[in-house]
Image (cartoon, rainbow, N blue to C red):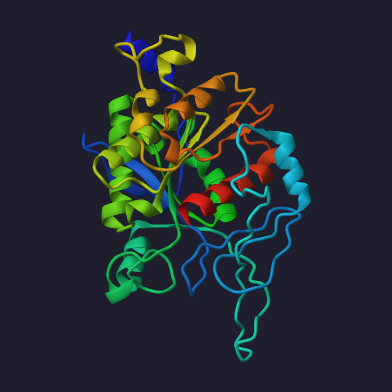
Amino acid sequence: MGDAISSLLFQPPPPTRLKESKVIWLTNSFGKRIPAFFIECPKDDRTGEGIRAPLPGEQPQGGGGGGSYYSKGSTKSQMNHTLATGGSRTNGAGNAVTPPSYNNNNNNGGEEGPQQVPSTPQIRTSKELEMSLLNNGRIGGGPSAPGGGGNASCTPTILYSHANAEDLGNIYPWCKFLSKMLGVNIFAYDYTGYGLATDQGDPSEEYCFADVTAAYTYLNQTLQIPAHSILLYGRSLGSGPSCYLAAKTAEEGEAVGGLILHAPFLSVYRIVLESGCTLPGDRFANVDYAPFIRSPVLFIHGTKDSIVPFNHSERLLDTIIEPYRADPLFIKDMGHNNVHASVRPLFVERLREYLDTHIL
């Protein structure tokens, strides 16, 4: 039965090609080679903070300080009430908090220069990343770490675990969008048996756990990004390795900075059968890992999801201990596979709110 479940659970698409020169190759604990890519967001050269692109209708605000932020008007608040359910605003007054914006000094006697337009996030090779670390003591530009060692970057890096029937080539535009709009770096990888790793064997739960661990080790040890600056993002199938790693790092005493679960499930069997417990042969029992997570967790789910029932997120949220429950984003009428353009402003706003409240 386990083999049958695996054949239904793992459905790699026809491999999508990526530029080999931009691929970062990782080796997991089983000796399987998997591809990954690192997208670096534009940063403020003075502070190292990520720069965020504006949402439609947002106006740049003056002021000094960190990354490029934009004001949130009443229209956005109305959209939030119309499209989202299940989670109060983090600001007790019901107003969005607007952090300071980034302005480019133009050497006019220290006067505030014109608003900088964020450049496009760039995919980086392993050599470029390692040279940046060697030269700057951190990933990207900006001030070096005190004493020239360690990674002083204040820009979070999202470790992205994709859904089923996707690979790195499919998700690259979405990851680039997230990097641009959230002002974060994105590190995404393929599971064994997916994409450029189709020749490494058939995918399995064990390989997925080893794959995400290899990706995390690269960020944390090779690039010296501290655990608190690494956020896990798992979409659908990706919620399995993400919950596993979040619980694992907590158990090891160095919990990751945050966890975003997008359309997660309690476990694979529970998608089709309410078992009441984890049965032998079940896969990705997120409900068993969730109580051990010690990072702020944001749940995202569409109420019209026909693949993973919406109540899986509601029930998983109940298993997260209280201090680590972020306000969830439950989007009315959204399905499983896409974040439609009509809800993207709300989606980005709430992700920024999560980052500003719990991470930055």
Q: Nearer the viewer, residue 60 or 160?
A: 60
At a point 63% along the width and 58% down the height, the residue shown is 53
Q: Would you place residue 262 above or below residue 42 in this image?
A: above
Task: Find residue 284 and report its horizontal and vertical position in percent.
Answer: 36, 24
Residue 287, compared with residue 262, is above or below; it is: above
Image coordinates of residue 224 in percent, x first then y, are 30, 58
Q: Is residue 350 left or right of residue 326?
A: right
Quick one: quadrant of the N terminus?
top left
Residue 114 located left or right of residue 133:
right
- 304 or 176, which is in the foreground? 304
Furthest residue to the bottom?
Answer: 109
Total marks drawn? 0
Whether residue 46 is visible = yes
The image shows residue 206 at horizontal and vertical percentages of 28, 27
Image side of residue 181 versus residue 281, left or right: right
In the figure, 231 relative to 166: above or below?
below
Q: Residue furthest left?
A: 30
Quarter residue 9 falls in: top left
Judging depth in this view, the residue of 39 and 358 nearest the camera is 358
- The residue sitting at 32% across, 69% down in the picture is 137
Residue 161 visible to an observer of this rendering: no
What residue is at 67 percent from the left and 43 percent from the top? Answer: 346
